[in-house]
Amino acid sequence: MTNTTINKIILSATTAMFLTACGGGGGSSTPTADTEAPVITVPATQTVAFGGTYTAAVATVTDNIDTGLTATTSGSVDTHTAGTYTVTYSATDAAGNTGTATTVVTVSPAVVVADTEAPTITVPATQTVPFGGTYTAAVATATDKVDGAITDITVGGDTVDVNTAGTYNVTYTATDAAGNVGTATTVVTVTPQFTIGADTITDALTGLVWDKNASDAGTCSTPKTEPTIAQFQTIMDYTTFNPTVVTGFNLASDYTIYKTSDDWKIKLHDGQIDNNVTTATKTICVDDSNEVQITKQNLTRDAGTNKVTDPNTGLVWTDDTPLPVKTFSEATDICTANDGMRLPTITELNNLYDRDNKKIVDGFENVNNVGNGHYWTSTIAAGNANQAWTVGFSSDSNASWSGEVAAFDKSTTNIVRCVKDAE
């Protein structure tokens, strides 16, 4: 046997021994541990409109061993707040390995639409107020498409004068936060003072019901009577002429003299008043059963300023010594220079004369010591711009001209008593 053969035998035996020692001859094995996390696939980004509905993106999960795994999410998205939000997706396999992925969700900014729509104001289209009654602005409501109810409503437009019949446009205005202005209008109707019927004229202010036609003096039948001079003056209109009564009466014009029940007379062609009733030729009858009775408050005097305040009208009068005898123009200037006062109207000065007692009304310091004569008013005689009306005052109640209403040329001189509107 050669050496080569011997070496082969020895190598084979050694190899066999080595394989046996290494287990190559067979036996059991140990499984490899799962350390690989699931893989989650989701969109990297997602966009949601402002105020829209957010739904989490669909995620897929794969694992090297497990199947059927699903992902859970964490993180919230507020679709009413613009910005970015991170939503995390997680999945865990049977071996406890957890995989994650994120989606960045963007909520778009709100789309701002310009507010160009004005508020809507709801008010009555019309409103009626009786002559001499009380006017209260109608209740208005305002709503806006964006701002909702608006409570700040401004009332403007015409000023409603309840003593002047006619129509007035009263406006209501509301402004929303964007500056849009909404308006609405109520047409307010002040009914006429006098309602003219077939034979009568009713005065809404006084409640007196007058005959439209004149009659012979002293022939009124119950419940009608001859009017007092105070009642007669409620239908006098010194801005008209021939006759100077309110429109609607069918009375004798020219220089017809009308009698009253308290021994006064009045010329309707111009409104002159005196107490010589013997010349009266006509009368007009009135039903005063529904006459509005007004309780007047006493006038008050301020000794410090020598001025008298009439609480019934708010007018403030000069008192004590009447101002000098002047022409109409001079009288006007004197009053203006006297604390911004003015000449009274014929109606205002008439109200200072107590025709029942033929003297100035109580409340003045020297009731029976007034300046004797006629006092200027600011009322110009209708039909003659060169004349102005006056009222006569006298300390002698028997003076035939005391309480007389007459027109004088402006160039003549009369006494001045000034008045000031309520302050």
Image: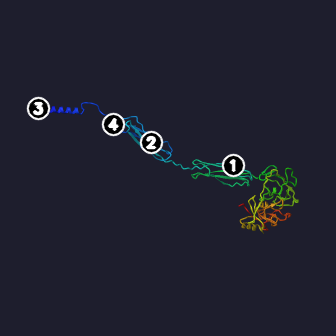
Q: Which mark is residue 126?
A: 1
Looking at numbered disc 3 in the image, what kind of residue is underneath it? Thr
Tell which of 300 and 250 is nearer to you: 300
Between 37 and 330, the one nearer to me in the picture: 37
The residues bearing labels 2 and 4 have C-alpha atoms spaced at a distance of 29 Å
Disc nearest the viewer among 1 and 4: 4
Q: Would you call the spot at circle 3 few (<14 residues within 10 Å), some (14-19), or many (20 or more)? A: few
Q: Earlier in the sequence, mark 1 or mark 3?
A: 3
Horizontally, is 141 left or right of 238 in the view?
left
- Residue placed under numbered mark 4 in the picture: 33
Q: Secondary structure at mark 3?
A: loop
Secondary element type, mark 4: loop
Which residue is farthest right?
278
Label 3–label 4 contact, CB within 8 A: no
Q: CA distance from mark 1 to mark 4?
A: 92 Å
According to the picture, the residue beneath numbered tag 2 turns out to be 74
Residue of label 3: 2
